[in-house]
Image (tube, rainbow, N blue to C red):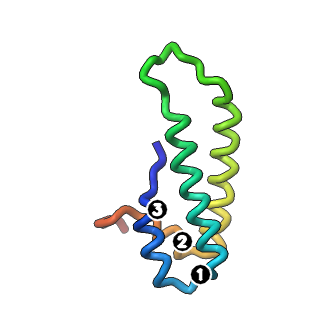
Amino acid sequence: MHYVDIELVRTRLLNTEVPSGVCKEYLQLLSSLNALSLLLTPAMDADEDEAGGETLMRLFQSHMSRREALEVEYPELGVLVRPGGWQGN
């Protein structure tokens, strides 16, 4: 499942030079990705076939592509989505 702490990212965005319009778009994309991820999570009953799953997956992939494009244009965005306490490289 894909999940980003939107409030943490919102707080971190306050200390960046990223234009406010881009910040709003990025937060909206992250929120949509969180919601789509929940919708795409397999149901408890594995025999259930969710209608529209392919459409949701295409929408998810489209949003991910836009997120990746923004992160290429504004590399600091990719850093801002790291979880609190992240200790990677």
* C-alpha distance separating marks 3 and 2: 12 Å
Judging by the rendered image, the residue that carries numbered circle 2 is 77
Q: Are marks 3 and 2 in contact (CB under 8 Å)?
A: no
Could you say where residue 59 lies in the image, as x and y percent from the top left? Answer: 68, 44
Q: Residue visible at 60% across and 68% down? A: 71
Say which amino acid is labelled 1. Answer: Val
Give the number of the mark in front: 1 or 2: 1
Judging by the rendered image, the residue that carries numbered circle 3 is 6
Rendered position, 13 above or below 66: below
* C-alpha distance separating marks 1 and 2: 8 Å
Rendered position, 66 above or below 12: above
Judging by the rendered image, the residue that carries numbered circle 1 is 18
Q: Are marks 1 and 2 in contact (CB under 8 Å)?
A: yes
Which of disc 1 and disc 3 is earlier in sequence? Answer: 3
* C-alpha distance separating marks 3 and 1: 16 Å
SS class, disc 3: helix
Q: Quadrant of the C terminus?
A: bottom left
Could you say where residue 38 lies in the image, as x and y percent from the top left? Answer: 50, 40
